[in-house]
Image (cartoon, rainbow, N blue to C red):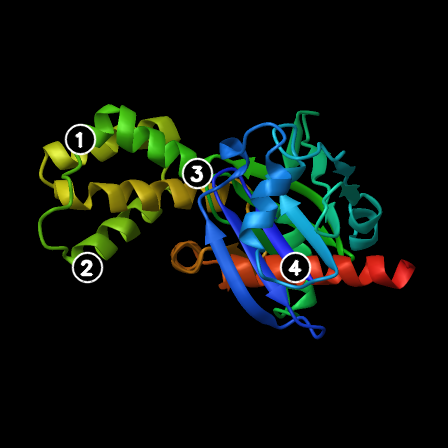
């Protein structure tokens, strides 16, 4: 089997043996937005070149409106069986290829929310038996708070944490107070600034007020310009964690360093948290879905 995680900006492929162990892995900056119309089969050919496999299972934005095939969302509550039923095949001359569906839900005010790819990571985490899970937070550009009940995704909320950080850093007055990072790093000072940002999220006043304080604290000499990005990162992560009042223990899924930062921030806020690497969760989730599909014949 070949497992594919095809997001907006990155394409990751994993060649697995019959027991689900990763034999080889490849990654390219060829997310769905960089693939021309009709170019998905060729892009898949390129990344799996030389690999032998009887089937390919894909997740992520490859199943979006901008992807290879728009696969309908599965409504919450969404269990693993519902995800497997929602898988759709695509024409690929290299063999059998299929795409997992995303998941949708509504918040308390009936505003819709969606995810693609993260649902696979949730079921991968559960399959890995990562221990008791009170709630799951997937850290990233669009962070997800996910509520799991009786083995199914009961609901979730999306928070634009990483994207807001990038926009503020590149296009706001906050970015102008941040030094370019060419000076030698002071790890201790960066960690202290990050912790201070996380703690700031506890305070009254709201995120918009807290954001301007990131500039004022640099101007008043309370935070060095080179540490301002760590302070801003801590603040946004702190607000993201507190927004959904997660139940402990909190499982944080993400790129290893990012997941560790989120887990550390949660601990500062009094929430027991454990990190899990996103690629492990993705592969385990695709294996779990594939096994259901194979059992059905």
Image depth: mark 1 or mark 3 in front? 3
Q: Earlier in the sequence, mark 1 or mark 4?
A: 4
Nearest the viewer among 130 and 280 is: 280
Q: Which mark is residue 187?
A: 2
Element assignment for label 1: helix
Q: Earlier in the sequence, mark 1 or mark 3?
A: 3
* Spatial CA span between label 4 and label 3: 31 Å
* Spatial CA span between label 2 and label 4: 39 Å
Quarter holding residue 175: top left
* Spatial CA span between label 1 and label 2: 22 Å
| Residue farthest toward the right in the current orientation of the protein | 297
Image depth: mark 1 or mark 4 in front? 4
Element assignment for label 4: strand
Q: Which mark is residue 2?
A: 4
Please name the residue shown 53% across and 34% down the image.
Answer: 35
Density class for disc 3 (Cα within 10 Å; few <14, some 14-19, many ≥20) is: many
Q: Earlier in the sequence, mark 2 or mark 4?
A: 4
Q: Earlier in the sequence, mark 1 or mark 2?
A: 2
Density class for disc 1 (Cα within 10 Å; few <14, some 14-19, many ≥20) is: some
Q: Position of residue 217 (x, y in %)?
A: 17, 36
Q: Earlier in the sequence, mark 3 or mark 2?
A: 3
Q: Which residue is mark 3?
A: 161
Q: Which mark is residue 156?
A: none
Q: Which residue is mark 1?
A: 216
């Amino acid at each position: 089997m070949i497992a594919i995680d095809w997001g907006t900006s990155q394409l990751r492929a994993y060649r697995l043996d019959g027991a689900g162990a990763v034999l080889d892995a490849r990654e390219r900056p060829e997310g769905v937005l960089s693939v021309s119309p009709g170019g998905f089969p060729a892009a898949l050919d390129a990344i799996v070149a030389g690999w032998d496999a009887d089937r390919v299972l894909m997740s992520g934005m490859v199943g979006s409106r901008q992807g290879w095939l728009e696969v309908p969302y599965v409504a919450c509550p969404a269990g693993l069986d519902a995800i497997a039923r929602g898988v759709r095949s695509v024409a690929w001359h290299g063999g059998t290829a299929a795409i997992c569906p995303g998941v949708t839900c509504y918040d308390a005010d009936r505003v819709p929310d969606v995810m693609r790819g993260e649902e696979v990571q949730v079921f991968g985490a559960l399959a890995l038996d990562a221990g008791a899970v009170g709630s799951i937070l997937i850290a990233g550009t669009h962070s997800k708070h996910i509520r799991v009940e009786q083995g199914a995704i009961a609901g979730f909320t999306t928070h634009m944490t990483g994207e807001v950080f990038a926009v503020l850093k590149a296009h706001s007055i906050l970015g102008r107070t941040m030094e370019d990072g060419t000076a030698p790093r002071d790890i201790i000072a960066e960690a202290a600034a990050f912790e201070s940002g996380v703690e700031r999220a506890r305070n009254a006043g709201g995120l918009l007020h807290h954001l301007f304080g990131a500039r004022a604290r640099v101007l008043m000499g309370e935070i060095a310009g080179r540490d301002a990005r760590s302070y801003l990162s801590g603040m946004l992560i702190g607000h993201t964690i507190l927004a959904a009042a997660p139940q402990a223990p909190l499982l944080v899924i993400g790129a290893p360093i990012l997941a560790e930062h989120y887990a550390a921030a949660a601990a500062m806020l009094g929430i027991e948290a454990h990190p899990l690497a996103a690629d492990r969760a993705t592969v385990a989730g695709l294996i779990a879905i594939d096994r259901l599909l194979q059992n059905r014949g």
